[in-house]
Image (tube, rainbow, N blue to C red):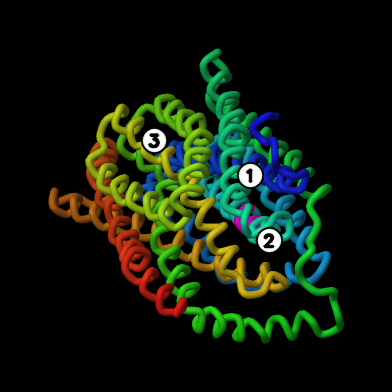
Amino acid sequence: MKLLKGYTRQEISWMMYDWANSAHSVIVVTLLPIFFDSVASFTADSVSSLSTWGYATSLAMAIVAVSAPLLGVFGDIRGMRKRLFAAFVVLGAAAVALLSFTPLMDFTSSTEAAGRVAGMILALYIVSVIGFDASAIYYDAFLTDITTPERMDRVSTMGYGLGYIGGSTIPLVIFLVMNLVGVPMLTCLAVIFALTAAWWLLFSLPLLKNCHQTSGKPYERGDVGRSVRGIGRTVREIIDNRPMLVYILSYFFYIDGVHTVISMATSYGANLGLDTTGMMLALLLVQVLGLPFCLLYIRLSDRFGARTMVGVGICVYMFICVFAFFLRELWQFWLLAVLCATSQGGIQALSRSMFGRLLPDRDRSGEFFGFFDIFGKFSSIMGPALVGVVSAAAANGMLAARGLTEATATAEEIDAINAAASPYGIVSILLIIAVGAVLYFAVLPRVSRGQAR
């Protein structure tokens, strides 16, 4: 492939995991919330499925975030990184494979049946996210093993680009084609969840075969205990390294906007009553545009620097949060999709490579990326939880203003109130990303200049 000319075999094999796990990102993270919203509508036990989905996403992220430093420590033992990576890939893919049975279950006969299926969806979703995000800790740590600091921006961003043209696009196209030719929607969902699990496993094989851990130290008796006790030392190193500390803190806030928009977009659209097929086509557009915009980010970062281009992405996502508040029509969802496509891959890829260049010790890359992942995941807890709390509070306030309760309101009244309350949850993300912007644009340059002296 001409696009990959100039990249080494190890670099390409590493990039292929973006191709592999992007199927989870687009199918599970975007299609599953729509299916869950349908199932939840038969349970009649929640004002807003958006809130429930936000809480489930936050729980999954919390589990990974709390365990990330320990997972990173284990990954720094020579030979363990690949084994742990494989274990979490299998865990996540198995959960997605089990999700393929849920659309075929009866969830319309009673509220109890719907509740059981909804609970199963949430449980398997949480496990799949744990597998996805825990494997990403080791995947990110492999970046320092398979390329040089000078090539990190290019390799990291191209990985996201391959994800867009592969895992993010092909399974979604298959789903849409099945739907358009008349295959029942629930059957389409069952098939595409099964395909996503197989896709994730299959395209993880190049990394497992060709990428090798060169950093880290051989295992010696007592290493795990010493490494765990050394987590405090790593915390002190990060605190003492002012540019790294401020960068991680800014990342914590600004990446919240990215992750929350990705994870909540279709659930938000479903609450507004937007056409499902139209939203799926808009998401397909995001994937199609993802690669060219990733290539543009590579070129612009070569010219202006990764720090400048991450700043551009922050500004784009601040505008996205404001625009989403006013979103009511499908064409506006399409415009929002294009805005996301411009910076979604670039800001994540360059953030990863910027941190990789800040590492003081490559032999402890797993440990440092574990802490990096904490900040990314805890931001992913905060955003969906905030959306859930604010949208639920707004919905309850609107019910009270009309003299209604969840028990006395009709299904139509609840749907209308959910649609009216959801924008307040989405716009609340702007508060968080604005804090990240202040740290990134105002504080980070100052501390970086101070260290340079």
Magenta span includes 255? no
Amino acid type for the residue under numbered disc 2: Thr
SS type, badge 2 = helix
Q: With respect to residue 176, does 287 lie above or below?
A: below
Predominant secondary structure, magenta span: helix
Q: With respect to residue 181, does 57 lie above or below?
A: below
Residue 168, image x, y percentages = 57, 35
SS type, badge 1 = helix
Q: Mark 1 sits on what residue?
A: 18
Residue found at the very far front of the displayed protein? 453
Q: Mark 1 vs mark 2: give the one in front.
A: 2
Q: Mark 2 sits on what residue?
A: 144
Q: What residue is drawn where x is 53% and y is 60%?
A: 354
SS type, badge 3 = helix
Cα–Cα gap, marks 3 and 1: 20 Å
From the viewer's perspective, is 38 left or right of 8? left
Amino acid type for the residue under numbered disc 1: Asp
Front position in the image: 210 or 425: 210
From the viewer's perspective, is 179 left or right of 13? left
Mark 1 Cα within 10 Å, few/some/many (few <14, many 20+)?
many
Front position in the image: 371 or 276: 371
Cα–Cα gap, marks 1 and 2: 16 Å
Viewer can see residue 309: yes
Q: Quadrant of the C terminus?
A: bottom left
From the viewer's perspective, is 277 left or right of 393? right
Q: Which residues are magenta?
A: 132-136
Viewer can see residue 52: no
Q: What residue is drawn where x is 57% and y is 54%?
A: 126
Q: Mark 3 sits on what residue?
A: 337
Q: Quadrant of the N terminus?
A: top right
Q: What residue is drawn where x is 23% and y is 54%?
A: 394
